[in-house]
Structure formats: C-alpha cells, structure tokens
Amino acid sequence: MNLPLFIARRINGSEGQRREVSRPAIRIATIGVAIGLCVMIITVSVVFGFKHTIRDKVVGFGSHIQVENYLSQQISEPAPIVINDSLMQVMKKIPGVHHVKRYSLTQGILKTDDDFLGVVFKGVGKDYEVTFLSQHIVEGEMPKFTDGQSSYPLLISRMMADKLRLKAGQQVYAYFIGNDNVRARKFTIKGIYETHMSQFDQSLCFTDFNVPVRLNGWEADQCSGAEVLVDDFDQLDAIAEQFVQHVNRTNDKYGSVITSQTIHEAHPHIFSWLELLDINVWIILVLMICVAGFTMVSGLLIIILERTQMIGILKALGMRNKTVRHTFLWFAAFIIGRGMLFGDIIGIGIVILQQQTGFIHLDPSSYYVDTAPMELNIPIIVLLNVVTLLVSLFVLIAPSFLISNIHPARSMRYE
C-alpha cells in the first residue's frame, strides 16, 4: 500500500475538519491553478484560431504556391506566361500538390456616375477553387466562371460596393487603358464578398479567365500564372523546393522565364506579424504558470504550518522525512488536479461558446476578423495540463523540505 497516498487522501477528504486558516488557502491555490490553466487554454486557442484564419484568407486569395513570369516580381504590371498542358502535368505530379489552376490579371477602373475606383481584375476559369470565396459571399451569388466566351460577370468586395454604391445585380462600366487607347466594358455584378482583409478587399475583383487575357492583348495560350494548392501546409517548403528544381528557370515558347514563390514570400509582412504572436503566447504561458506555482507554494506552506502537530506525530511514529514530504506532495497534487479540472471546464467552455456564438468581437480594420477566432487543439490542451501539473509539483519540492526542520517533541506542543 502507498502510505503517503493513503494519508493524503484522508487529509483531502477531511473537509469539515480543516481549520479556518487552511480552507481559504486551499481555495486560493485551487483558483490560482484554475485561472492560470483557463487563461492558457483560451490564449492558445485564440492564437491557433487567429493564425489559421488569417493564413486561410491569404491562401484563399493567392494559393500556397504561385507560378508566374519572372518579370511579374520585378514590375507592377502583369506579365504574361505560357503554362501549357505538359507543364500543368509536371506540377500536378509533384508529391503533395492538391490542385493547380491558371489565372489572369489586368488593371482597370470601375466607374459610376458619382465615383470611380482603380482595381485589379482577376480572371479565373471553371476549375478555380471557389470554396473560400463562397464562404464570404454577403450579397448575391457566386458567379459561374468560364474559360471561353464571357458574359462579363463580376464579383466585387463589400468595400468596393460601399465606395461606389453598388449592389448585386447592377451593371457597372470598367475602363482599361493600354496601347494608347481606352476600352470600356460593361460588367454585371453577380455577387459581393467580404473577408475583412483590406489589402485584398479594396483592390481585387473576379471575372472570367479570358477577360483579362483579351484586354491585355495577350495570345490565347498566355496567362498571368498558375496557383497551386498543397495537401499539407506544414510541407509547403519541401513542396516549393520541388517546384524550384522542376519548374523554375524554364522558358515558355515566347522565351519568358518561369519562376515560383510561396505564400510566405508573396506576403512576408503578414506572416512575420503572425509569427510575432508566438512571443506573446510564450509570455502569457510563463506568467500563468508562475501564478499557479506561486499560489500553490503559498498554500502548501500554510498547510504544512497548520499540520505541524500531525507531522510531529508521524515522525514520532517512525515516518521518515521523505515519506512525510511525499504525503504533502500528494495532497498538493489533489489540489492542483481540482484546479486543473475547473480550469479545463471553464477554458474549453469559453472556447466552445465563442465558436458557437462569436460573442467576443474585434475591430476588423485592425485584426482582419470581426470576431475572435478560437480553435480547440486537444493535444495542446493535454500538453498544457501535463506541464502545469509537473511544473506546479516541481516548484513545491523546495518548500516541502520545511518538513525536515520540524522536531517531533516541539511540534506536538505546537498550536
């Protein structure tokens, strides 16, 4: 039989016999552990949810890997490239690639009777992955994009619609300047999207694939590039290296140099900002573990002082200091476990409540989202529980040695 565990259970079960000194100390220690673990769960859930939400939005606009003309990275105007079927097959056969699709870009001006706005028209075909855009449609419907003859459909952002006072179903003229002339086209607004990513919402609209190609005066087999989606984001760098080896530095039929870049390279400022969040998480985790450890140390010292008589009796009966220390460490483990249980219930409950109701709101102009995104990561939560338990018990080892200084004869007269 484990004697320290048995005695610790009896002490833990004697709720009604505790003195007024130890009862609030135990409650404070339990609350300290609960608050610390609860804050850690919420913090990690928010950071994981926030990083994945922003990452998915950026990927939704630009995919994981972009294959394009080398000049496109050097100049502001779209540069054409030929991505034929053989090159498409090469990219699709690279391990880890989920989907490849062509796209085209051109610049133009949307104009109404009262205002105008310079935008980028992105042409996409019927094979374009529209799941992301469909999730953010706020008015109208998702257009059915085509690769052939176009009826000039247009998907614009809520930011554009508000500035130009447009609604789904309306028609709007767009003007394109090139080769010393101005061409006008009438588009029909099929839908309006809103992602709160201002750098995309304020400038990017979608239409059929061939519209930018014809407006740019390109050949029928030319486009702006291809967007590649991968199966596992964590393997993005390894897959990108395969593109460097098999796709980069090749030439198309017109002599243009093909290159590729990852979403990290295309938008380094966004991902650098997201990486800074990890520093905040570590700071909060350390602070909360310190709070839990401090309250447990205080509680244990109070309990040891209160149980001085019992410690003296156990020593007089022949129990070694090590066994007595283990007894109080087991007792502390019960308190920590109770606090962790409450912390898990409250922390996970708040995360689930936020996921279902979105009651915590954010300023989308600053955070790119209108509600705080939270993501439950069970392995991380289990790891937080284990680390909290181990660290809390570790910091209690030194205070437990106070028991070695308690003399049996004097302690049995202690009150």
Image (cartoon, rainbow, N blue to C red):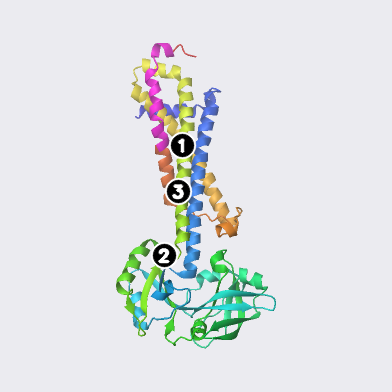
Secondary structure found at label 3: helix
Q: Can residue 69 be seen in this view?
A: no
Residue at the disc numbered 3: 279
Residue 352 drawn above or below residue 323: below
Kind of residue at badge 1: Cys
Magenta stretch encompasses residue 101: no
Q: Earlier in the sequence, mark 2 or mark 3?
A: 2
- Which mark lies nearer to you, 1 or 3? 3
Residue at the disc numbered 2: 265
Would you call the spot at circle 2 few (<14 residues within 10 Å), some (14-19), or many (20 or more)? few
Frontmost residue, 162 versus 238: 162
Q: Is residue 311 visible?
A: yes
Which mark is drawn over residue 290? 1
| Residue visible at 50% across and 32% down in the picture | 29
- Which mark lies nearer to you, 2 or 3? 2
Q: Which of marks 1 and 3 is nearer the N terminus?
A: 3
Q: Main secondary structure of the magenta part?
A: helix
Number of labelled discs? Answer: 3
| Residue visible at 59% across and 78% down in the picture | 109
Secondary structure found at label 2: helix
Q: Distance between the residues labelled 1 and 3?
A: 17 Å
The magenta stretch spans which residues? Answer: 391-411
Kind of residue at badge 3: Ile
Frontmost residue, 4 versus 82: 82
| Residue visible at 54% across and 48% down in the picture | 349
Quadrant where the N terminus sits is: top left
Residue 351: x, y in percent? 54, 51
Residue 126: x, y in percent? 48, 80
**Residue at the limit of the structure toward the right, as seen here:** 114
| Residue visible at 47% across and 70% down in the picture | 62
